[in-house]
Image (tube, helix red, strand yellow):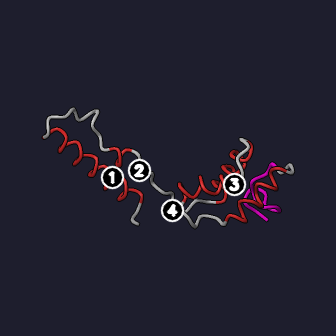
Amino acid sequence: MGSPVKMAMAQYRAINNCLVSHEAEGHCAYFSLCYEHVNRRAAIEIPGKCEIRPVIRFLQAEVHSAAEIHHRMSEVYGPNFLGDKCVTDWCRKFLYGRKDVHDEGVKNGHL
């Protein structure tokens, strides 16, 4: 995949082409966006730990299973973002009272 900017531009062009073809057919462009373009999700290619762990904590607090959390996050971050065992481990840590999403022993970016 390319950069996020290139991906966004490609998606914009695809939607624009869809609008033009609908207008040519006499359809109202505002209500005739192609379903496949509007509902396509853009994957976040390289998520950071500081981004993933709070999401796991939030979804776990909503009483989602580790498998559900892994599935939902895989849809956004891609299939290889984090192993299901690692998601399970973090769910267990949060369930047993862990509040901090950062690595242990690290304060303000320093060891």
Residues in magenta, as a range: 99-111
Circle nearer the N terminus (1, 2): 1
The image position of residue 93, as x and y in percent, is 82, 55
Under circle 4, the secondary element is loop
Question: What residue did someone put label 1 on?
Answer: 11
Q: Residues within 10 Å of mark 2 (few under 14, many from 20)?
A: few
The foreground one among 76 and 12 is 76
Q: Is residue 110 above or below residue 38?
A: below
Q: Residues within 10 Å of mark 4 (few under 14, many from 20)?
A: some
Q: Marks 4/1: CA distance? A: 16 Å
Q: Is residue 37 above or below residue 77?
A: above
Residue drawn 30% across the image and 49% down it: 12
Secondary structure mainly formed by the magenta segment:
loop
- Name the side, left or right, on which 47 lies relative to 89: left
Q: Amino acid at mark 4?
A: Glu
Q: Amino acid at mark 3?
A: Arg
Q: Marks 2/4: CA distance? A: 15 Å
Question: What residue did someone put label 3 on?
Answer: 53
Circle nearer the N terminus (3, 4): 4
Instruction: Give yes or no for contact between labels 1 and 2 (Cβ–Cβ under 8 Å).
Output: yes
Q: Marks 3/4: CA distance? A: 16 Å
- Name the side, left or right, on which 30 lies relative to 100: left
Q: Amino acid at mark 2?
A: Arg
Q: Quadrant of residue 74?
A: bottom right
Question: What residue did someone put label 2 on?
Answer: 40
Circle nearer the N terminus (3, 2): 2
Residue positioned most to the right: 96
Question: What residue did someone put label 4 on?
Answer: 45
